[in-house]
Amino acid sequence: MSEPLLFELSSHGRTGFSLSCLDVPEKNIDTIIPAQFQRTAAADLPELSEMDVMRHFVHLSSLNHHVDKGFYPLGSCTMKYNPKINETLSRTESFAATHPFQEEAEVPGALQLIGELAEYLAEITGMDDVTMQPAAGAHGEMTGIKIMRAYHEANGNPRHKIIMPDSAHGTNPASATISGYQTVQIRSTPEGLVDIKDLKEHLDEDVAGFMLTNPNTLGLFESQILEIAELVHGVGALLYMDGANLNALMGLVRPGDIGFDIMHFNLHKTFSTPHGGGGPGSGPVGVKAHLSKYLPSPVVVNKDGQYRLDDDRPDSIGKISGFYGNFGVMIRAYIYIRMLGAKGLKRVSTTAILNANYLMRILEKTFLLPHKQHAMHEFVLSGDWQLEKGVKTLDIAKRLLDYGIHAPTVYFPLIVHEAMMIEPTETESKETLDYFAETMIAIAKEVDENPEILHEAPVNTPVSRLDEGLAARNLNVKYVADAQ
Ligand SMILES: *Cc1c(COP(=O)(O)O)cnc(C)c1O
């Protein structure tokens, strides 16, 4: 029988964490694990040298495309560089060894970080209070909608509809529907903005709120936002901002100053955490003062310079996370904000906008650009000119991988035919942007000269085109010993 693994973790750091309860005498394994559950033969574990293991994982990491390997202009998702200092600091023991069941008095540092981060987010957006509980943007949407419901019910005025534009991200209608609301979709204008006439036709006293992404998913700033806010508030409804595109606004526009009552943040996007493939995320929700009392309980409050958990919140919508959200993502966001400061955050947004417009003005000569006005941090091309020659947007997306570039978001937003949604982010150099533009132009040339290669792409990747629908429905993941 193998020797039991013993921990030796001493008390340390400002969280005062200790695992002394696991400090069991070495030979006393029977008191921890009943005899019938103990292993009788040694585990058949592979024996490998550190070097073999290192090479194995480095090799594996190079099979997949990721933001540390190459350009990743996945619109809406904001795949920017994630500073490595975030990773190092979020793994320091005093944070990483904190347990959610610890007493409040043992984790003042963690509470201070959560409290200060909420204050920064409020300052950046002009909101009055921010909860850090939601674990993703979509979770934040659901939280925001619960707040909407609590507000209307407290006013003796339950409502049943939530309006959103046809350019909305799929999570918006999903969040409204899962919360029991009827989703009402309104049209965008040919310029890609909210169709005010259509909005007016659908606004009535049964509308709980209007959910809007600003800048919207076409990368366009909703320039009529003040009029929209007035119309929405005119029928007693609330204005919700999907804040996934906040990286275009920081230091330039504050959602709380232009009529939004509620918004969610995507910390993992705007404030840099490695994400994709389902996590990790953090979707704080900010509200204006008239909605503060509905925020999920507990709320981190600052009492006489000490950050504390306040759960004396009779009007709260209740707890929406098992504990207090994804703390590791909050640490990264906190570091990102503190490192950049107010001026740096503004530069994030202005550079993200500059980079997107730079690429857009080059590529509009080769690809159809349906919405031609100045963009914010992303823009949407259409592959319609290439489709006429028998090549789909999906083929272009796959071909980009052969050149070491991840595809843009494709076929979204739904209102652009053969859409390619490109978000370069602020962290890419001009050389990388130029390489991407040259590659897109080279692919367009291939469409004319050698469309077959596009139908077969990718040809340089470990596996070529997969049946993604089948893979999603019939997931079959297994360990293959000779995968190399
Ligand atoms: C990413 C995104 C969401 C959803 O956020 P998650 O954190 O992935 O749940 C919602 N709206 C828009 C516009 C997004 O880009």
Image (spheres, rainbow, N blue to C red):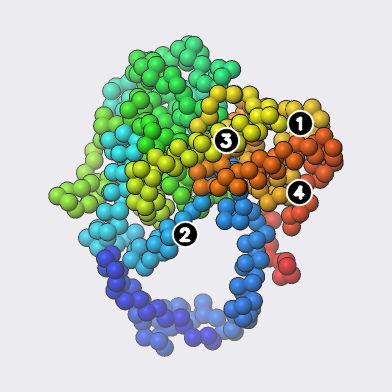
- Residue denoted by label 3: 358
Mark 3 or 2 closer to N-term?
2
Residue 458's label in the rendered image is 4
Q: Position of residue 147 (x, y in %)?
A: 35, 33
Q: CA distance from mark 2 to mark 4?
A: 30 Å
Mark 2 touches mark 1? (CB < 8 Å): no
Q: Nearer the viewer, mark 3 or mark 2?
A: 3
Residue ID for mark 1: 386
Q: Amino acid at mark 2?
A: Lys
The residue lying toward the viewer, choosing from 63 and 342, is 342
Quadrant of the frame with the C terminus: bottom right
Please tell me whether mark 4 or mark 3 is closer to you in this view. 3
Residue at left 31%, top 44%? 120
Does the CB distance between marks 4 and 3 fall below 8 Å? no
Disc 1 crowd, CA 10 A, few/some/many (<14, 14-19, 20+): many
Q: Amino acid at mark 1?
A: Gln
Element under disc 4: loop
Q: Compare marks 3 and 1 and give the one earlier in the sequence.
A: 3
Name which of mark 1 and mark 4 comes first in the sequence. 1
Q: Quadrant of the N terminus?
A: bottom right
Label 3: which secondary element = helix
Dot 4 beta carbon under 8 Å from ligand 1: no
Q: CA distance from mark 4 to mark 3?
A: 27 Å
Left or right position of 277 against 259: right
Give amino acid for label 4.
Answer: Pro
- In this image, 420 relative to 228: left or right? right
Residues at marks 1 and 4, CA–CA distance in whole angstroms: 18 Å
Residue under label 2:
84
Distance between the alpha carbons at the discs numbered 3 and 1: 22 Å
Q: Are marks 1 and 4 in contact (CB under 8 Å)?
A: no
- Seen at 36% across and 82% down, the residue is 24
